[in-house]
Image (cartoon, grey):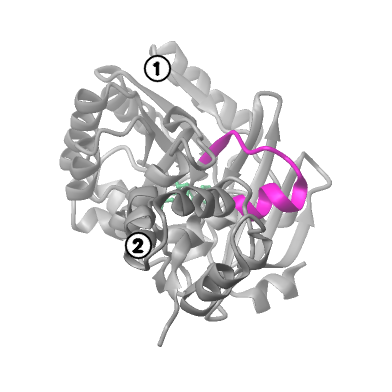
């Protein structure tokens, strides 16, 4: 029989489960604290439980495996990339970025991705499988343990589409912000989506306070469709309506992400159309000069052109920043995370 994934049990579920196996409810509090505050990797560590109980737990439950396979530290900025191995041999990546306001971890939500965005390395081998809440949580737990650094911010912008793994993703957010866990404020959590309209609307109604980032990348339906296959399914107008709904329901300003590609989406017309989209919304635009990947010939605009693009939008009254590139020497930058360890190894 497969062991049960104990790290994916919410506090309420664990309390119920522990009562079911005939233990007192306060044991659930202790076990939850070992798993989500003290970040235990084994039941042996849970020294305030009897040996009997620890053995029983170990025979029926597992603490899901997220084990360090490689760690790369950037030479250009305070960024580290972690390659983790899961119990079934799948490899996933997470990135730690240190800022003066705190430490931010970028996690993966799926092994691989099926969204097919043209400029993104994470989708090249397709989707392998969804990650469980425990596998999302333990990327953060592991990084905190390995580095001894407290994580204050989390972005779900690694490999995968969080809204294509909806239930696990929402549970992960609840558990990450739970007062009995790491207790990270939902306002310090951002999730990025390529724009799965029904799930943006669902998310708006969950009562969460996380920031939604929408991958826009094209200033009209036609352009967006060329870069992002998901746009064949959901029209830009529907996506924007869903974002407006998110803002209306949560009061949280939506961030739009725009990967700037030389001669593809950096024209004066793009600026004009983008201004039209942004102007009537209370939102923020994050321009990411595209990080080239070897499978495609998308080119990064030079710094001057990217700055020009930003300045022109600013002149039009748009709230815009250029995202500072992080960890490019370790392929930790946006869209550079890839599932295949073999190819990652070859490249470094
Ligand atoms: N599936 C989510 C999270 C993906 S990655 C989403 O689509 O939003 C986070 C951001 O990096 C997305 O906006 C994504 O479009 C962008 N991105 C992907 N590849 C990139 C690349 N090569 N250069 C710059 N940004 C990229």
For the residues labelled 2 and 1, the Cα–Cα distance comes to 51 Å
Image x and y of residue 37, in percent? 58, 45
Give the answer, above or below, for where 45 lies relative to 194: below
Left or right of 113 on screen, residue 137: right
Q: Is residue 118 visible?
A: no
Q: Quadrant of residue 109?
A: bottom left
Image x and y of residue 316, in percent? 38, 13
Location of mark 2 (residue): 17
Left or right of 96 on screen, residue 154: left
Picture quarter with the N terminus = bottom left
Q: Assess disc 1: are there few (<14), some (14-19) or many (≥20) residues with their C-alpha within 10 Å of its C-alpha.
A: many
Q: Quadrant of residue 63?
A: bottom right
The answer to which of marks 2 and 1 sits earlier in the sequence is: 2
Image x and y of residue 142, in percent? 65, 55
Q: Assess disc 2: are there few (<14), some (14-19) or many (≥20) residues with their C-alpha within 10 Å of its C-alpha.
A: some
Q: Which residues are magenta?
A: 141-154
């Amino acid at each position: 029989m497969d062991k049960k994934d104990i790290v994916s049990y919410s506090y309420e579920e664990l309390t119920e489960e522990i009562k079911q196996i005939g233990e007192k409810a306060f044991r659930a509090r202790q076990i939850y604290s070992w798993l989500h505050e003290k970040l235990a990797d084994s039941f042996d560590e849970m020294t305030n439980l009897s040996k009997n109980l620890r053995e029983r737990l170990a025979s029926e439950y597992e603490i899901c495996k997220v084990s360090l396979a490689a760690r790369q530290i950037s030479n250009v900025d305070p960024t580290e990339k972690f390659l983790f191995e899961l119990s079934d041999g799948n490899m996933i990546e997470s990135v730690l970025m240190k800022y003066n306001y705190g430490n931010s971890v970028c996690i993966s939500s799926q092994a691989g991705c099926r969204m097919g965005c043209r400029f993104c390395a994470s989708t090249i081998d397709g989707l392998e499988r969804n990650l469980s809440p425990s596998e999302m949580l333990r990327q953060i737990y592991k990084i905190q343990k390995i580095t001894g650094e407290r994580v204050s911010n989390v972005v779900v912008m690694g490999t995968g589409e969080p809204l294509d793994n909806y239930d696990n993703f929402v549970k992960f957010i609840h558990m990450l912000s739970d007062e009995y866990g790491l207790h990270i404020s939902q306002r310090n959590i951002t999730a990025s989506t390529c724009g799965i309209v029904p799930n943006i609307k669902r998310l708006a109604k969950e009562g969460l306070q996380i920031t939604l980032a929408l991958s826009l990348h094209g200033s009209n339906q036609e352009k967006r469709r060329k870069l992002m296959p998901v746009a064949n399914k959901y029209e830009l107008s529907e996506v924007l309506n869903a974002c407006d709904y998110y803002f209306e329901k949560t009061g949280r300003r939506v961030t739009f992400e725009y990967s700037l590609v030389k001669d593809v989406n950096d024209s004066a017309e793009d600026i004009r159309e983008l201004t039209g989209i942004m102007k009537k919304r209370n939102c923020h635009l994050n321009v990411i000069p595209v990080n080239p990947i070897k499978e495609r010939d998308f080119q990064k605009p030079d710094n001057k052109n990217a700055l020009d693009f930003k300045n022109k939008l600013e002149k039009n009254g748009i709230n815009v920043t250029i995202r500072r590139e992080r960890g490019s020497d370790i392929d930790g930058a946006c869209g550079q995370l890839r599932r295949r360890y073999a190819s990652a190894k070859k490249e470094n």
